[in-house]
Amino acid sequence: MDYEICEAHDLADGAMRTVEVGGHKILLVRDGGRYHAVGATCPHAGAPLADGVLQAGVVRCPWHKAAFSLSTGKCVEPPAVDDLPRFAVRVVDGRVMLTVPEQSGLEPMAHGPSDARCMVIIGAGAAGAIAAQTLRGAGFSGRVVMVGLEEALPYDRTVLSKYALSGRKGGEKTPLQDEAFYARHRIERRTGRVVSLDTEARTITFEDGRSLGYDSALLATGGVPRPFDVPGHALSGVHLLRTPADAEAIVKTAEGARRAVVVGAGFIGLEAAASLRERGLDVTVIAPQTAPLEDRLGTEIGNVFRRVHEREGIVFQLGQQVEALEGEDGRVSRVRLKGGAVLEADLVLAGLGVTPATDLFRGARREDGGLAVDAHLKVVDGLYAAGDIAAFPLYGDGPRTRVEHWRVAEQHGRIAALNMIGQATPYDAVPVFWTIGFLKRLDYVGHAATWDDVVVDGDLEKPEFLAFYVEGGTVKALAGWGRDQQMAEAVGFMAQRQDWTVPELLQALT
């Protein structure tokens, strides 16, 4: 059915507008004199794309920075895993007309000619799931086998420390795809543990003795939570968080608890602390740093998180370490600090980070446990690595870097899959991550392992700011709070070049 939307001159070049026609929310865009119409809502978490930014024929989500091609509707950057529906648009006698089919939907994946190759993906998290989906999206018609440790469908792990613990409902799509998707695209899902990998014979062996040959394989095994190795760590009520089962166990403990202690003030620790506080528990955070997230964001920005959490009633014990956990009848009830202080606790959650799960292949393993890969994410011929375990050349030709974040893992999965089937594609994207607490989000674009200065534009107390991490006069990364559109723009600008000064980049963002 055709709908008359507006006069052609009503939409300025570069403008985006949401219209509702035929029961659909549609994003109408004029870009370079051409009109485009795609779905108006980001399929990842429901953000309105009209609040995002338009750059070089791509619309970028304002929340989690997924990106979509206007000409095709295809998702070109995660964390979204689905494309946008696309609608026919034309100008007739100076008026914009939209055609909405009675049953609009996404175009099916096109499979190429029959292919005898077998692609094996070890790991069913962010990188593994996106790799499997990308293989089919790129037209590969051979065998795709995805091996995971959990029977559950691949899910969004980022919701565990947020909505799964808080009890709030989040908008993120999880599981990433339903069972019918994997069946329809002939993606074999296997549950089991791989115990050996022979790169010469190109064979993997399972714990039960079965083996499987491959033409190309992807290691996407992710990380393993660092153990909380103190006396009393085996008491009931002491938890790590990595899987839905872990989250369920924490929630069960929380239902009968009043006081929670979170050990660790990194991203997982802070997100979990906020979620438990939202559930109504008294929460104390213990960490050896002088500020939360100090090693990643610096003291000044780390203290923004401290103030935000303290305003919600969370107590921090910084510069402290746990000496032991104590309790009665096998259940934790106290946390003893090395300085002698004792905290009452009905629930203890340790968020101490992860170590790369790389025992399957030690040949290229680095001191930090990660695997060294080239710009195409190749470890050795026929073997690729993606996600938390991959130490990749930053921007394709920079120092080897590991980034333990969901969005980067999804990017890796896509690029690795293309290279596995011979579509040579370097990974040169700008890393992006976010963290959320009390429904407030900080975005981070770029990568700064070290920095000389942090230049702030905005108000840290409010908070609402951009923070530029500068080394040698060049912006290595920036963090933003309450600056959704500018941070969405920053992804494109940082991807274009890596030699911005603060005044140049700030001017570009405004």
Image (tube, grey):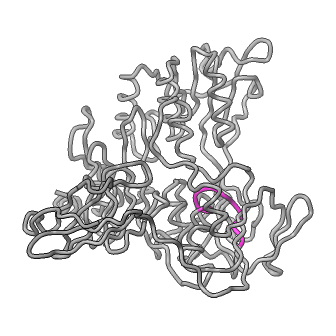
Instruction: State the residue at coordinates (80%, 69%).
Output: 197
Looking at the picture, how far across and down is residue 49, in whole percent?
30, 55
Looking at the picture, how far across and down is residue 270, in whole percent?
49, 34
Q: Quadrant of the N terminus?
A: bottom left
Name the side, left or right, on which 2 lies relative to 262: left
Residue 342 in view of the camera: no
Residue 274 located within the stretch drawn in magenta: no
**Span colored in magenta:** 120-129
Which picture quadrant has residue 263? top right
Looking at the picture, how far across and down is residue 106, in whole percent?
45, 66
Residue 127 located within the stretch drawn in magenta: yes
Q: Is residue 221 above or below residue 374?
A: above
Instruction: State the residue at coordinates (66%, 22%).
Output: 253
Q: Nearer the viewer, residue 206 or 399?
A: 206
Q: Is residue 381 above or below residue 252?
A: below
Name the side, left or right, on which 182 lies relative to 295: right
